[in-house]
Amino acid sequence: EVVDRGADALRQVPPAKDGRRPVRIDDVVDGLLDDRFARDGAVGERVLLGLGLHDVPRRTLLGADVPIVGRKRELGTLRALYEEVVDEPVARVVLVTSPAGGGKTRLLHELLRELAPQQPTVLLGRADAMRVSPHGTLASAVRSAANLVEGEPLDVRRRKLAARVGEVASGVDKARLTVFLGELLRVPFAGEGLASIDAARRDPQLMADGIRAALEDWLALECARRPVVLALEDLQWADRATLATVDALLRHLEERPFFVVATARPEVDVAHPDLFVERDRQDLHLARLTRRSAARLVRAALPSADEGLVGRIVERGDGNAFLLEELVRAAARGETAMPDGVLGMAEARLAALDPAARRVLRAASVFGGTFWESGVTHLLGKARAGTVDVTRWLGRLAEDELVA
């Protein structure tokens, strides 16, 4: 069905003038994309034009900006930390956590919008579970600051990077910073007469040291002219080189106005148990939205909805901002089934479980809404149950709020 839907959508998109066929996206995909992705066309006929760069992506719901609800306290905490960074000055790091769809990204982007009038230097990056490479997460943040866009000619990216570095550095320093940051961003320059880069290209450790030194020196220069905000999303998927370098930056810039705001799912402390533990890390966990806040979100998007519909969406959304938005979109289309976006998120969450946990959960699901541990053990069979600690995995599933 999915392949047939995709093929049918593709046939409806005429080729562009250069002969290439644009990427057609349906309403579900359109709703999952933020404003980093350039799109065109009416609802139901959208095409993806490419990946652009925006300092703060906008999140829209039914074509309108999504109001942020139920996060006044958390926003106040983040603003207070930023003010401390500027007033002291001092480097600070805060980790914002919540399960998938809990509103981490929305909170981060709202913070950046509120800070925009103060004109800090913002580096906005994101970890990608499908594209893990050394310093890849940090590189995405530096790339955004230099306004480098994927697919641009190499000469264009070189000019942009050199111009960005040239805003704070000159002479030999500019050459060194530009070349080593170019290595980080895969924008290679000629040696520029620097013996250090020639040696580094023959020695991975020298290259790593050179990139780290370039980042430290460049960001120190940036901090000297205005506060710097390094915003990193989905840190549970970040590469270790990025995390080690950010830790080093926090140490090197400890008396500079350097603010690191990172978002992650709760499992980040399992993937990276010692994350920024020596940097006085501040933790901010986002609870589920209250029913009142959830209802405000629904009414803002569906002002003509009756109380019954609002109540049903709030009940099914269970305080999860992403689920609420998907349910709102489904309601606007007149649908009553669970939206594809919600199902996809549920599938991703289940796929992330340990295989043994999935087996236990699958066995429990056979019984419906209520099950018994002894029944799960019996259903798995003595042979398989002997290799699966059912009690332990049910405990873990309860901690993850998949069973109660």
Image (spheres, rainbow, N blue to C red):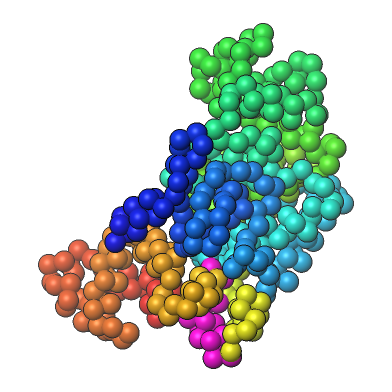
Main SS, magenta residues: helix
Query: x and y percent of residue 160 in the render?
Result: 69, 28
Outermost residue, right direction?
A: 87
The residue under the point 62% across, 65% down is 63
Left or right placement of residue 130 versus residue 127 in this view: left
Rendered location of residue 280, percent (x, y):
68, 53
Residue 345 appears in which quarter of the rendering? bottom left
Quadrant that contains the C terminus: bottom left
Asked if residue 297 shows in the view, the reply is no
Relative side of 81 to 187, left or right: right
Q: Nearer the viewer, residue 57 or 207?
A: 57
User: Quadrant location of the N terminus?
Assistant: bottom left
Q: Write the residue at 45% across / 46% down.
A: 14
Residue in the picture at 51% in, 55% down: 46
Please provide the residue range marked out in magenta: 307-323
- The image position of residue 29, as x and y in percent, is 47, 58
